[in-house]
Image: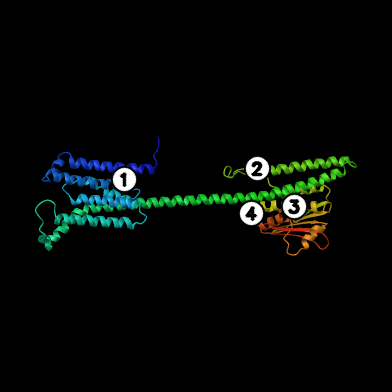
Amino acid sequence: MVRIPIAARLPLLNATLAVGLTTGAALLAFNGEYAVKVHSNFEAEAEFHSAALAWWLFTAVIAAGLLVQHRWPLPAFALVIAGAAGHQFDSRISAPLIDYAVPIVLYTLASLARNRWVPAVALLLSMAGNYGIGLYNQVYPIEGPPPDKVAALVPARLTDLLLSNADKSFELLLVMVLAVALGEVARARRARLAAVEQRAADLEREQQQRAALAMAAERARITRELHDVVAHGLSVMVVQAQGAAAALHRHPERTAAALQEVITVGRGSLAEMRRLLGVVRRDPAEDAGAAELTPQPGVAVLPALVDQVRAVGMPVRLVVHGEPVALPAGVDLSAYRIVQEALSNAMRHAPGAAVQVHLHYGEAALVIEVRNDSCTPRTQALWEQPGEPVPSDGGGHGIIGMHERATMLGGHLEARPTPNGEFLVTAALPLGSDQEGAP
């Protein structure tokens, strides 16, 4: 079944009302016994035809108002009032059915008006006009003997005329007030529905904005994760490849071991890159709430990381101070990434230097120290330039990325050369941080 839109149904409804009321009024006025009574009100046939023509003209004006009532309610109301006033001036052809268009259009005006005073003023003006025309018809009737103007001005007679006309207008007043009240109810309901729809649209737009911000933050986090994965993996692979090339002729067995380590590290890095890029490609609206099956690395896997770096020929020592405790997910991941990045920087800038990694479990914070025994002249020169920002590895995510991780968790990070020629990275991560999604 095909449903017609409301915008298309309103003109059809208006046309049906106009045709129905006009046809009913015409049949009532010019057909059957009532038509005979209407003819008896006229002394000459020409007078009847003239009055009938005027009736049809005023009826056409009312029908025009009905047709445009939803598009131009105020002009439509003016049309139906003008047509009804013309019918009221000549009451010899009485067909009140078409005049019911007045409360119908008044209802439409009240339901569509932006200001509630518009239908109220329209109601007062229409009732005042109806009362004035009724009073005029009583003082100057079309039928009967000429009016006695002097008698009409007698106080007793004038009072009777006013009260009589008030009685005739009371029923119409009730109908018109009811039309305005119903129209006001419809207008209030429409405004309430519009407010609800607007509120729902605002909430939906806010949710979309939040989702977009969350997606941007997640992609920024994944970018940092990719940097850490690629930087560390490639650093290990480059060192191993250099060692394999150097030992190719003198120690073939070491070359095979180094190449095998390159393969292992490369496969692990590719697997983690695929996992992270899979998160970027996935539409969060399709799998909202889906849990990430692959666990994030943390402090628990630092021994494996140290073994991996130690396998490339760098002497690395991991020392844990205090009793290890369960860490918030954000602190756990950030601690691992900070150590990973510090070891990668040590392999790039101070290959072969001894590195010490210290984890201090305190009551309020986890303190990380990564110290290597050699600070290269390039790194020393960078730190001796006053006013320079914290240097990075050239990709924009080295020490700066470590600093951002610590800051987002409410902690701090320092990366400075020491007076005795070492390079020290110190990070303090509060254990009270509950930022599960922190990078």
State the image coordinates of residue 228 (x, y, percent, origin top left): 72, 49
Amino acid type of the residue that numbered disc 2 sits on in the rendered structure: Gly
**Which secondary structure lies at badge 2?**
helix
Depth check, front residue: 192 or 119: 119
**Which secondary structure lies at badge 4?**
loop
Amino acid type of the residue that numbered disc 4 sits on in the rendered structure: Gln
Q: Nearer the viewer, mark 4 or mark 2?
A: 2
Q: Please report the residue visible at 32 percent of the width from the left and 56 percent of the height from the top.
A: 118
State the image coordinates of residue 82 (x, y, percent, origin top left): 25, 52
Tell me which numbered mark, 4 or 1, is placed earlier along the sequence.
Answer: 1
Label 3 crowding class (10 Å Cα cut-off): few <14, some 14-19, many 20+? many
Tell me which numbered mark, 3 or 2, is placed earlier along the sequence.
Answer: 2
C-alpha gap between disc 3 and disc 2: 23 Å
Q: Which mark is residue 435?
A: 4
Amino acid type of the residue that numbered disc 1 sits on in the rendered structure: Leu
- The answer to the question of whether label 3 and label 4 lie on touching residues, with beta carbons closer than 8 A, is no
